[in-house]
Image: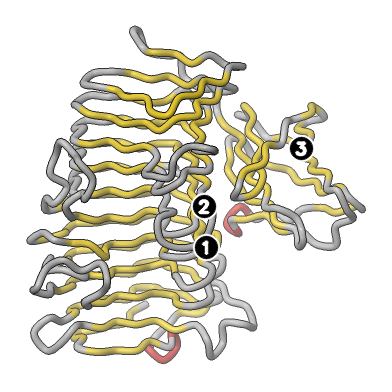
Amino acid sequence: MRVDGIPIPVISTARGDFALWTGSTHAVVEAFASVAVSEAHLRPRSLGITPAIAGQRIALDLPGPARALLEAPGLPHLHLFAEPESQAAPAGARIIRAGTIERQETLTLGEGDCLWVERGAVLNAHLDLHGAGIRVGGGGLISGAGLARRKHIVADGCPGLRIADLLVCDPGGWAVVLGACDGAEVEDLRVLTPGSGAGTDGLDLVGSSHVRVRRVYIVSGDDAIVIKAFPAGEARTSDWSRPVSDITAEQCILGTYGGHSMEIGHELTVSHVEDIVFRDIDVLFAHNFGGPFGIHNGDRAAVRRVLWERVRVDHCYHQILDLRVMRSRYSRDAERGSIADVRFRDIDWWTTRFNEGYTLGSIGGKDASHRISRVAFERFRRDGALVTSADELDLMFRHADDVTFSG
């Protein structure tokens, strides 16, 4: 690669290649493939950028800062991260300097600690965080390559946690997990997880309330951003089975090879999960068995007041949405819960010829006593046309009430 004529390293991961550079202004980006290229696409679609192709060269004008995915048939995905200047380390931070690689099985942080992995540095370690006021950032890479398979970065009982400006690659389990972390903030996080299927989530918010997630880029094998509440299973110092309220994720770019781009569930062993907002989201793709929008209430929780707003779906295949109260292999409670007051507002979904007749949506309660109620579609568009009925989304219903469509 070259950016404005300057060579940029391309780094290989289990989820494709990436290039990261400091780029706060418009730039000419050139990627050179090992073979001649016949077509290439830059996602998200909302950027409105069409690459120019000449033999093995792919060129595009990229605004900065920006995060995007370059796709060309037969080649690995190329994740492009043009990032603003990284912040200086706070006073007292433990710093891993640019140009260094530090390896250890586990690095533990406690109350008030700060870890700063500078841009150009690599930390090859699991992170275990315990205590209030922890901060992790710096712009560098935290890699799970070669480590034992388990949850990679785990914040266990960390109120006021701040994670900002990090790249996390090749974890051996869930990439970033916030358990009982009220008041946490996650900003400018980039996550690339391998595979396709359970155990490869991007960002898990478990038993945590008053959380803000902003400007994250996640391409994952399973769910990208997922909200849960259940006993942790492993030995933890805090209770992850706590009611959840007031979570907002906005200005995010998400892609999944299984699972859902934005998911609530399956494990919800609490009284309620409420006031959840996903806003201004680009879904690059939802491949395989998943979909962009999911609520899977496998336990007793009352899930209520969920808003998806200004979401742009470039591609999905199996399902556009799946809202269900059910019993699954992840269920722990004997009693089932409910889902109510869900809104889809200003949604744009783009399809291909492969979607027609195959891509479905489902809204289904468990039984007559455990239902889904009041689901509103407000300015939901398919290929630019307003959706005015369930038939236009191939929606399937079971024990669901008051599903409405409006322009």
Quadrant of the image containing the N terminus: top right
The correct choice, above or below, for 267 with respect to 53 in the image is below
What residue is pinned by disc 2? 219
Relative image position of residue 344 (x, y in whole percent): 33, 69
Amino acid type at image mark 2? Val
> Residue 110 or 54: which is nearer the viewer?
110
Name the residue that disc number 3 marks.
28
Dot 1: within a 10 Å radius of its alpha carbon, few (fewer than 14), some, or many (20 or more) residues?
many
Residue visible at 54% across and 63% down in the picture: 285
Quadrant location of the C terminus?
Answer: bottom left
Of pointers 2 and 3, the one earlier in the residue sequence: 3
Crowding near the residue tagged with mark 3, few <14, some 14–19, many ≥20 C-alpha atoms within 10 Å: few
Residue at which label 1 appears? 257
Q: Amino acid at mark 1?
A: Tyr
> CA separation, marks 1 and 3?
30 Å
Task: Report the amino acid beneath label 3.
Answer: Val
Numbered disc 1: secondary structure: loop
Seen as rendered, the residue at the extreme front is: 148
Residue 280 in sight here: no
Q: Earlier in the sequence, mark 1 or mark 3?
A: 3
In the displayed structure, 231 sits above or below 103; it is below
**Real-space Cα distance between discs 2 and 1?**
8 Å
CA gap, disc 2 to disc 3?
24 Å
Between 373 and 244, which is closer to the camera in this rendering? Answer: 244
- Compare marks 2 and 1 and give the one earlier in the sequence: 2
For residue 111, above or below residue 62:
above
395 left or right of 67 in image: left
- Decide: is 93 above or below 200: above
Provide the secondary structure element on which disc 2 rests.
strand
